[in-house]
Image (tube, coloured by chain):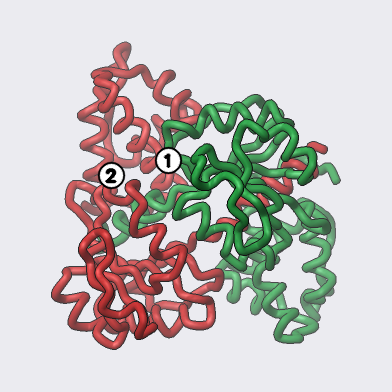
Chain colours: A green, B red
């Protein structure tokens, strides 16, 4: 699906709406007012309406949103009406913890491959059944295991070279946990996860309010 | 330090600038043009100037920014000219991986306490020297170990009750890795880390460009 240029903040909020809607589905809520949905998502109702307006008309005036319908529509917008396969590169402490984290699978993300360069790790079978492969085999494994997105949890010093290998293997999306800015061609989309940046925001609030 | 209402996006970008400036310091770069700094931070130069303008005048016209000075000024703005002590709640796979992650210490964040409710874990000494305490002891430990920020890596079902206990123990900042929205009083600032929201942005880009 193609739309006009959408702000990244809108895309992130759509994810948050979909998380809340999924919880509501699980609680068997059928319809929710825009006010209540907004409150549960910790945004204001006008923001939800504005975000959704990029993609068409949603909700029923005086009634609110049908939870299941809105969830499906947001999933379609985000491209989440299908599973996405992930390949982990770097099966250290953090990588292992992430592969075991149930939240990925809950949202349709499946680790179908894992890579390392440590001979002690290569060949080991993870609890999920995935066997750790050597990074040298990335080209074949990405094809065989239909990997769409690379997840980098290597040390910073290796992250750029790993990103290069992933791009050459045909990967166009990277979730980067290594605390450096990696450079990729325009065809590839990178999202960085740096926990300490969130801590800086907390530090800022505690200092300026203190 | 108190300033006018600053957008959260500006605060996050200040963190990113400080990461890049720290790398430049380590590479012994003394001065950097606003163009080169912007490129390394993956933003445009006008954005950096706008973000910094909230806090005063920085940089020298025709020269650029003095790396060490700007880094110190940004650290002062964010409240990072002092160390911050963290208390981890939930020492499972993810919690253990985070405690061992060198990136926290690099940016002045020190885990001085760790909590769990599992009798198998309570009393165990982590590689950092911190002994895992029972969550029942949170009030005393927060005081003894001078904990400023709580880091929640428990299952979702426990996260709200843990947040309540942290707030009662005097904690005003929480980094929440559990995939639910936790509710806290206004005196407390929460930042949520949900990796799958970043993956949704990648999925969106791969779909809409596909």
Q: Can residue B24 be spotted in the picture? A: yes
Disc 1 is placed on an element classified as: loop
Displayed quadrant of residue B97: bottom left
**Going by the picture, which residue comes out furthest to the top?**
B62
Q: Residue at x 35, y 85 (%)?
A: B119
Which residue bears the numbered disc 2?
A: B106
Same subunit, labels 2 and 1: the answer reads no
Kindly tell me whether residue A175 is visible in this rendering.
Answer: no
**Above/below status of A24 relative to A97:** below
- Residue closest to the eye, B102 or A34: B102
Q: Are marks 2 and 1 in contact (CB under 8 Å)?
A: yes
Q: Is residue A157 above or below residue B103?
A: above
Query: Which residue has dot 1 on it?
Result: A179
Image quarter of residue B61: top left
Residue at (40, 49) in percent of width and height: A197
**Residue drawn at x 26%, y 27% as measured from the top left:** B26
- Separation of disc 2 and disc 1 at Cα? 11 Å
Query: Could you tell me residue A181's position as x and y percent?
Result: 48, 33
Q: Residue at x 37, y 54 (%)?
A: A201
Q: Residues within 10 Å of mark 1 (few under 14, many from 20)?
A: some
Residue A173: x, y in percent? 67, 39
Camera-side residue: A131 or A25?
A: A131
Residue A133 in the image: state x and y as whole percent: 63, 42
Q: Is residue B117 above or below residue A177?
A: below
Label number found at residue A13: none
- Residue at mark 1: chain: A
Q: On what subunit does the disc labeled 2 rest?
A: B
């Amino acid at each position: 699906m193609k739309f006009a240029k959408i702000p990244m903040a809108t895309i992130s909020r759509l994810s948050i709406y979909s998380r809340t809607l999924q919880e509501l589905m699980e609680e068997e809520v059928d319809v929710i007012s825009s006010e209540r949905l907004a409150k549960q998502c910790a945004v204001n109702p006008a923001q939800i309406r504005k975000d959704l307006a990029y993609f068409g008309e949603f909700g029923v005036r005086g009634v609110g949103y049908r939870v299941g319908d809105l969830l499906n529509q947001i999933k379609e917008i985000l491209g989440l009406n299908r599973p996405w396969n992930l390949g982990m590169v770097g099966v250290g402490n953090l990588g292992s913890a992430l592969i075991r984290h149930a939240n990925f699978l809950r949202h349709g993300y499946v680790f179908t491959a894992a890579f390392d360069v440590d001979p002690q790790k290569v060949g080991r079978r993870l609890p999920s059944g995935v066997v750790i492969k050597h990074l040298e085999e990335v080209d074949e494994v990405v094809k065989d295991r239909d990997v769409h997105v690379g997840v980098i949890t290597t040390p910073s010093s290796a992250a750029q070279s790993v990103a290069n290998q992933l791009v050459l293997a045909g990967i166009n999306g990277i979730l980067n946990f290594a605390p450096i800015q990696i450079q990729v061609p325009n065809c590839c989309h990178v999202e960085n996860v740096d926990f300490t940046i969130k801590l800086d925001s907390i530090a800022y609030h505690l200092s300026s309010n203190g």
